[in-house]
Image: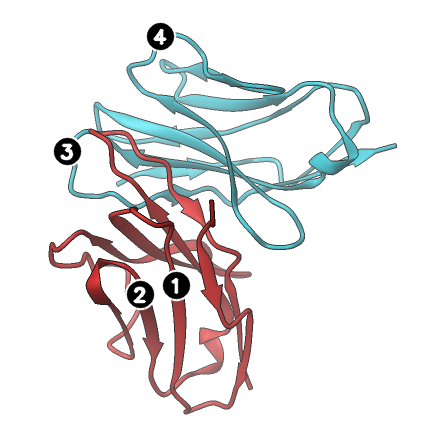
Amino acid sequence: GAGVSQSPSNKVTEKGKDVELRCDPISGHTALYWYRQSLGQGLEFLIYFQGNSAPDKSGLPSDRFSAERTGGSVSTLTIQRTQQEDSAVYLCASSLAVGGYETQYFGPGTRLLVL
Amino acid sequence: AQKITQTQPGMFVQEKEAVTLDCTYDTSDQSYGLFWYKQPSSGEMIFLIYQGSYDEQNATEGRYSLNFQKARKSANLVISASQLGDSAMYFCAMREEFGGSARQLTFGSGTQLTVLP
């Protein structure tokens, strides 16, 4: 079956522009996560969606970052007024929560470069 | 708060040999899960193996095994019979389990493994 897909694969933008990153989770997976991977900070959690519950936004670094998940499936991460420090790989993961155990499966990531 | 420590930034191993990648963790949670992921140069994170904190036996998946020592708070990954395709970055991660509100993974800094021919 299809894995987690993300688009675009690469994105180059100018400082101050807005960008949208898309994640299409594995079909049937109820949980969706966004992480950021950068050289200086390693892998950081950004936001988590579970079914119809309110998302856990505790990892978002600033109010320039937002995310939504439409219809419990596709998710979009939006970064407004991008800064050079936003340059990183943005990884999406999904999981099918079964009891207390779940494995998160990751997409290939979107490499964002802010000039 | 949870913390994962991987003290080996880089490791080398000869093809067909076994290698152990170290991981120690710190948590106040009673119930937690430990994961290992592989990230090749292509960038995708590939799930390798999982160990629950209440599992009495060490997890195994093919050539991967997890040496879980709960008292020492360590969860080392053992790769047997290394292959050239095993060259990649390896991340140890953990997460609160069983009803905890924090579902996200906490990652270590990773170990870059290079398999030599």
SS label for mark 2: strand
CA–CA distance in space, label 3 to label 1: 26 Å
Q: Are marks 4 and 3 on the same chain?
A: yes
Where residue B39 appears, as percent x and y from the top left, is: 59, 46
Q: Are marks 1 and 4 on the same chain?
A: no
Query: Looking at the rendered structure, which numbered label has been put on residue A75?
Result: 2
| Mark 1 crowdedness (10 Å alpha carbons): few <14, some 14-19, many ≥20 | many
Q: Output the letter for the chain in cyan.
A: B
Outermost top residue: B56
- Residue name at image x 33 percent, y 76 percent: A78
SS label for mark 4: loop
For marks 4 and 3 on the same chain, the one whose residue lies earlier in the sequence: 4
Disc 2 residue type (three-letter): Ser
The residue beneath circle 4 is B56
Query: Looking at the rendered structure, which numbered label has been put on residue A23?
Result: 1
CA–CA distance in space, label 3 to label 2: 24 Å
Above or below for A100 versus A40? above
Chain of the residue that carries numbered disc 1 in the rendered image: A
Chain of the residue that carries numbered disc 3 in the rendered image: B
> Do residues under tags 1 and 2 come within 8 Å of each other at their CB atoms?
yes
Where residue B100 appears, as percent x and y from the top left, is: 16, 36
Outermost left residue: A53
Colour given to chain A in the rendered image = red
The residue beneath circle 3 is B99
Above or below for A106 versus B97? below
